[in-house]
Image: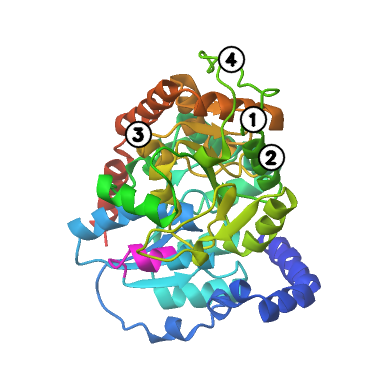
Amino acid sequence: MYLLYNFLLILLVTIAFPFWLYKVVTKEKHRKGFWEKLGLGTELNSVPGDSRCRIHIHAVSVGEVIAATPFIKGLRQRHPEIRLTLSTVTPTGNEVARKRLPEVDRILYSPFDLPWSVKRFIRSVKPDIYVSVETELWPNFLREVKRSGARSLIINGRISPDAFKGYRRFRFVMKRVLSNVDLFCMQSDEDAERIREIGASSGSVTVTGNMKYDQKFIEMDEDAISAKMRLYGIGKGDKVIVAGSTHPGEDEAIISAYLDCFKDKKNPPSPPFNKGGKGGFSSEKLRLIIVPRHIERAADIEKLVKAKGLDVIRRTGLRNSEKNDVPHRTVIVVDTIGELSTLYSIATVVIIGGSFIPHGGQNPLEAMYYRKPLIFGKYMFNFKQITEEILENGAGLMIEDNDSLKVALQGLLNNSSKQQEMGEKGYHIITKNRGAVERNIAIIEKFISGC
């Protein structure tokens, strides 16, 4: 099996090499960590040997890093003697890890699943315990971890519907890959059943919950919220739509829905929210802030905004620590990293990006923590369990199409009591689901005792 897998992998790399090389040369984000991903980074070769228990934690990108943060901090606090290595795949994940996790001894890029890259990486890190946050199932890497004598765990594990369909077709292969993992700590009963169906032994699977509920949220008091509003030129009576982590194919619909919310007798809000029969909004009281998932898309969003006849300003065009005078009917596009979570605190309504296209949605929990009502599309499968709770408890609205987005926005913006009710329900979902971090730490402590 591995011979065939590596043959196909090397063939694919050979065919794609010219395109790959072009990306590395022309795009900074592809250059970052490139040599480390090949297992050739100088940092890998400069690690002093010691006798401490070595734990390697892998978190693909920003979402996984954020989910792993309370776990890593709790683990370090209880076991200051361990040596922690954290690997990521994306540059943004790597950057967030460096900012948020000073507790980690080394932060590296994870290697490509090429045999020589993986072997070199494992020889350098020398893990006693390998922990993957969520479900990264790379055959060469997991086999090499097993060969090194390290124990391996999946924590916060989940299997999306699409991934499940793909894995199930190759169950005979996946069973062998999964045999290299000692324990699967899954988010839900459904995830546990899926991992069993694709080949994990029943005795190696347990359910510990979703660590994303345990993430540490940034507290925003009234002074901090007021300062944020001044920075973004938001007036006290303004209604603010924050569209978070948007992807290509979503921004135009959001901008159009925003325009449709302006005062227009022909487009009054629709039930069930509009009980007072009020019309739309004047442009002086309605603001739109778009935060793209990838900041390099800021220029494309600017063009979309201008094409709709609106003015636009980037976050980097705002003066820091001063009150900004942002004209009305001006859309703000955030082209900085790390501000979205606190931006939710000044929102009236939050639109969750990545959910109006088949991407799977982005994390809604930060908006829920700030007690904000949510609107999202029908593609929230990356957060299936959380989305189900949101809908069951009435903390958010799932919309089917662009017309529904306009109706949902107008309805929520016109109903302050509904905003508050939905926001409180979202916050309650977070408080009642916490505890997965403690359960996962308790499990890994049993492995640490065997180091």
Disc with the residue nearer the chain's start (2 vs 3) = 2
Q: Kindly report which numbered mark, 3 or 1, lies closer to the viewer in this rendering.
A: 1
* Residue in the picture at 70% in, 28% down: 403
Dot label at residue 256: 2
Part of the protein shown in magenta: 96-104
Q: CA distance from mark 1 to mark 2?
A: 8 Å
Q: CA distance from mark 1 to mark 4?
A: 12 Å
Q: Kindly report which numbered mark, 2 or 3, lies closer to the viewer in this rendering.
A: 2
Across and down, in percent, residue 256 comes to 69, 40
The residue under label 1 is: 406
The residue under label 3 is: 430
Q: Assign a secondary structure to mark 2.
A: helix
User: What is the crowding at mark 1: few (fewer than 14 residues within 10 Å), some, or many (at least 20)?
Assistant: many
User: Do residues under tags 1 and 4 come within 8 Å of each other at their CB atoms?
Assistant: no
Q: Assign a secondary structure to mark 4.
A: loop
Q: CA distance from mark 3 to mark 1?
A: 28 Å
Q: Assign a secondary structure to mark 1.
A: helix
Disc with the residue nearer the chain's start (1 vs 2) = 2
* Residue in the picture at 33% in, 54% down: 227
Dot label at residue 271: 4
Can see residue 401? no
Query: Residue 200 vs residue 301: left or right?
Result: left
Q: CA distance from mark 4 to mark 3?
A: 29 Å
* Residue in the picture at 60% in, 66% down: 113
Q: CA distance from mark 2 to mark 3?
A: 32 Å
Q: Quadrant of residue 141?
A: bottom right
Q: Which kind of residue does numbered mark 1 sit on?
A: Lys
Q: Assign a secondary structure to mark 3.
A: helix
Quarter of the picture containing the N terminus is bottom right
Can see residue 55? yes
User: What is the crowding at mark 4: few (fewer than 14 residues within 10 Å), some, or many (at least 20)?
Assistant: few
